[in-house]
Amino acid sequence: MGQAVSINDNILLLTDDGPRLKGAVCNDCGTHVFPAASGCSKCTGSSMSEAVLGTEGALWAWTVQGFPPKAPPYLGETDPAKFQPYGVGYVTLEGELKVEARLTEADSKVLKSGMAMRLTTVPIAQDEDGNDIHTFAFEPV
Amino acid sequence: MTDVAIVGIGMHEFGRHEGVSGMEQGAIAVRRACSDAGVAWNDIEFAYGGSYAAGSPDTMVSMLGLTGLQFINVANGCATGGSALSSAYNAIKSGAYELGMAIGFDKHPRGAFSPSGPAGEGRDWYGGSGMALTTQFFGMKINHYMETHGITNRSLAKVAAKAFRNGSKNPMAWRRKPLSEDEILQAQMLSYPLTQYMFCNPGEGGVALVMCKADVAHKYSKNPIFLRASVVRSRRFGSFEVTAPSLAIEHNGGPTIDASKAAFELAGVGPADIDVAQLQDTESGAEVMHMAENGFCEHGEQEAMLANGDTEIDGRLPVNTDGGCLANGEPIGASGLRQVYENVLQLRGDAGERQVPNDPKVAYTHVYGAPGISGVTILTR
Ligand SMILES: [Zn+2]
């Protein structure tokens, strides 16, 4: 088994305490953004600091991806015979923002707005060195 | 006070046209519109043209004739047609020109629009992770709406069935075979709760409109249609839009609400005055949500309205009488202008088999495009 590596260190850190999402916060009005940006879409200010986002929240909106996305850009399984539908949703991180993420649950009978979710990662592909590329996802608590 | 009129309309059939370029389809639409208005291409003083994937619109002058007119290209995603119209409307309203055109055409490759996400350093994590698909946004938005306002999957099927039924009465439409609600519900689930037949497809086609100052309209047409409002708005902080890796906690209703309010104000009419409406239906849930966002009902009332048949051609508020994007496909540059073309036909009483009864007098169009742009027009006879 390869080592787990982040899909992109600018947005996802794999720490000893678990995964963390990296965004930014506006120094003028406190608005959070993800991914990090050089300006604030609320107050139009341009003084931003790096911010590590919360790891737990409530599911706000969701769907289930029922067909393989095009590759590129998709890094995961695109063979229709092997493709497994996956959930996608927005999770409310209280006091920060709603973040869009894959969901580990893909059953439309189980998924429900308001359910408690926690940040995790899922392996999506291997890189040229045989490492497992992980992207962020939320799982029901 | 009305000061801009539509005096000529032209369309190239929507669908798939092997061997005919998108721009040729645009040129055919232009010639048909000029002929409808009884004018020649060299009478046209200016044009605004939009195309997403079929070439730079201003180069079509080499097909139509090098007359030296002012030709400006516009691009605003799915709202491109609405933006071309709004620009032409303002050019005439300003007094700078008397006679001009809004033109839109397109030709897209098969399959869904390619995903694209935020630019940044390193690996494309957004598309790479399997997000960034426009279909997901539409699934999430209507799913959230259904959970909040009690809309059922059956209502989504009713919208799609109506679109194909209306499309079957439209010789310009792409998909002209009616489908039952059950066929629509049982089709492949692309992005829950939306099945294959609830989504429109990228397509081909062209539309052109000849517009002039209202006080000279009768020179060109015995039944001119007056453009009472043409408004485009972009999103504000807190709105829920396509391909957004994050959203604000606070919620804003989105650009459609803003554009709709501004258009009603400008035209001096209200939602109750509208006799026929064309609303953006990228997928059937979008039509449901846009009924409320444009002020035609309260959130949640759509369930009963659809069950009553209120939005059918003979209903209280006919919606997407030409089959909408679902039956016509979505050639991005032309789509918003198709809606206006249909409303002009309806107001002239020339919509044939799909004519709205009782002599409609006021008509409404709404186009919505990524990444959060809405265009609204209000037309009267
Ligand atoms: Zn700010």
Image (spheres, coloured by chain):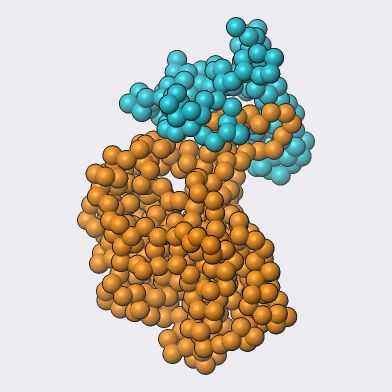
Closer-to-camera residue (B324/B264): B324
Residue A124 position in % (x across, y down): 56, 21
Number of marks in picture: 0
Q: Say which residue appears at 45% left-offset and 37% top-offset.
A: B140
For residue A84, above or below residue B340: above
Q: Which chain is orange?
A: B
Q: B109 above or below B223?
A: above
Q: What residue sits 30% from the left and 70% below the top?
A: B354
From the viewer's side, name the closer residue of A1 and B44: A1
**Furthest residue in direction bottom, as rendered:** B219
Is residue A100 visible to us here? no
Residue B292, how many percent across, how many down?
A: 39, 53
Which residue is depicted at the point 31% across and 62% down?
B168
**What shade does chain A have?**
cyan
- In the shown orientation, is residue B180 left or right of residue A127? left
Q: Is residue B56 above or below residue A67?
A: below
Q: Position of residue B26 (x, y in %)?
A: 56, 69
Of B100 and B59, nearer the camera is B59
Residue A87's quadrant in the figure?
Answer: top left
